[in-house]
Amino acid sequence: MPRVMVVEDQRIMRESLAQVLREAEFEVFAYGRPEQALAAVAAEHPDLIVTDVRMPGMTGLELLEKVKASFPFVEVVVMTAYGTVKDAVAAMKAGAFDYVLKPFEPEELLLVTKKALEHRGFVVQQELRDRDNGTVLIGRERGLSSLYARIEQVAQTQSTVFIRGESGVGKEVVAKLIHELSPRRNKPLVKVNCAALSAGLLESELFGHTKGAFTGADRDRVGRFELADGGSLLLDEVTEIPQELQAKLLRVLQEKEFERVGSSEVRRADVRIIATSNRDVEGEVRKGKFREDLYFRLAVVPVKVPALREHKEDIPELVQYFVRNFACDMGRRNIKLVPGTMERLAAYDWPGNVRELANAVERSLVLSTSDELDIAVEGGAVLRGKDAVEPGGIYVVREGMKMEEVERGVILATLGRLGGHRKNTADALGVSERALREKIKKYKETGVYNGD
């Protein structure tokens, strides 16, 4: 059921709007003051806000700007009187989806509301399709505020950009933003994972090859440079490029020309290079593993993405984002965080950065059957909470483990902590005793559990 927040200082009008929307099968939250509504957005997770413009204290325009700054996927429809159409124009410029002029018929409001929700669904689905392993760039505190400024600054240029940062901070997301804000936005952004391919395969991927160039080359192949012509080429983890190929890449960057493998025909492509690395690049240069001249050619405009521990103030917003989107994928709507969860998350340094946080949220949602979600992470990827393993029964989740292995480990760890008591274990995990019995039966049959 879509969630709509109504913000109107006139009580009769507010109650009337809420009733119209409830009859249309929306879940409605009504507030008489914008300050109250703003404070409730993080907890209520509205899909849409319908707000008056002229109200005492904070105006509807101010509410719109604050909501969009922190929750960009919440759509906003403004209501304004006929004589103040300029307020509606200002609202549209600030990011409102649409406006309605007072007085209006209920059908008019419902039509605009449904269109706004349809638009939001499209935007969110597009964002989810573009998301890389749950990594998103969200936040405005400290390091990220300067990062946004740098992104906007370099996006308008044609210069090569070198994005550096630890694994999981969102380097690829930054690369996508730079491309989407650039004059090349209507041309492709082509990605090459330099760490995943051998020297021979990577050369073919980058420059293409001709039929018969090597065993298995049964046809001509267009390389990534040609595919990205007019757009941008993302060299992900560029410092992993084998040394024998670094000289060829340097030549392309300098001369703007290349040949396909197996061909002497010179080709050219108009490509903007965006490179990323999670390495100490200067250290790699000193060790002779990465060419210094290639490094200087790539690092025309350096961009540093801060680690999550450097902007922990953004953790609450990130958590709300991940909870909302993962829960939505699972068909769960009313997830609330238990008190103290955010404090525990902020106390952890997150060596895996935003990706680790996203994984922690997703795992805890998968393992929890309660609408009250408790997330805590300690000593690496360790889950703890009333719906997983509580203090004294910590279960370590290692990289590469399947979700069924994680579930089994959490259940068995909790059984061990509670002395094999099934009812207490079921209560601690938030599942029925019957469901727990079925799991234990399966574990006994496979030989991974020998308890009573």
Image (cartoon, rainbow, N blue to C red):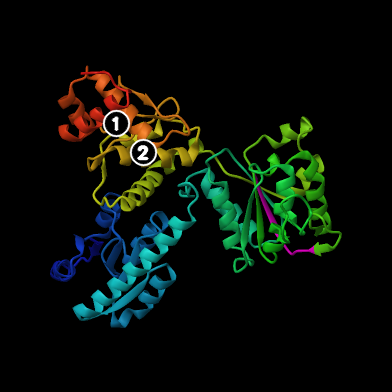
Q: Is residue 370 left or right of residue 342?
A: left
Contact between labelled residues 1 and 2, with CB atoms less than 8 Å apart: yes
Q: Amino acid at mark 1?
A: Ala
Residue type of the residue flagged with mark 2: Arg
**Residue 413 part of the magenta segment:** no
In the visual, does 274 lie left or right of 352?
right
**Residue underneath mark 1:** 388
Disc 2 to disc 1, C-alpha distance: 9 Å
Q: Residue at x 20, y 81 (%)?
A: 105
Is 73 drawn above or below residue 291 in the view shown? below
Residue 143 image point, x, y percent: 53, 43
- Residue located beneath label 2 in the image: 363
Structural crowding at the residue carrying mark 1, measured as other residues with C-alpha within 10 Å and reported as few (<14), some (14–19) or many (≥20): many
Closest to the observer, 228 or 20: 228
The boundaries of the magenta stretch are 268-276
Using the image as rendered, state which of residue 59 and residue 44 is in the foreground: 44
Q: Main secondary structure of the magenta part?
A: strand
Q: Is residue 116 visible?
A: yes
Q: Compared with residue 7, is residue 298 higher up or lower down, i.e. above or below?
A: above
Q: Secondary structure at mark 1?
A: loop
Residue at figure coordinates x 25%, y 32% from the top left: 439
| Camera-nearest residue between 129 and 150 | 129
Query: For the C terminus, which image quadrant?
Result: top left
Element marked by disc 2 = helix
Counting labels gives 2
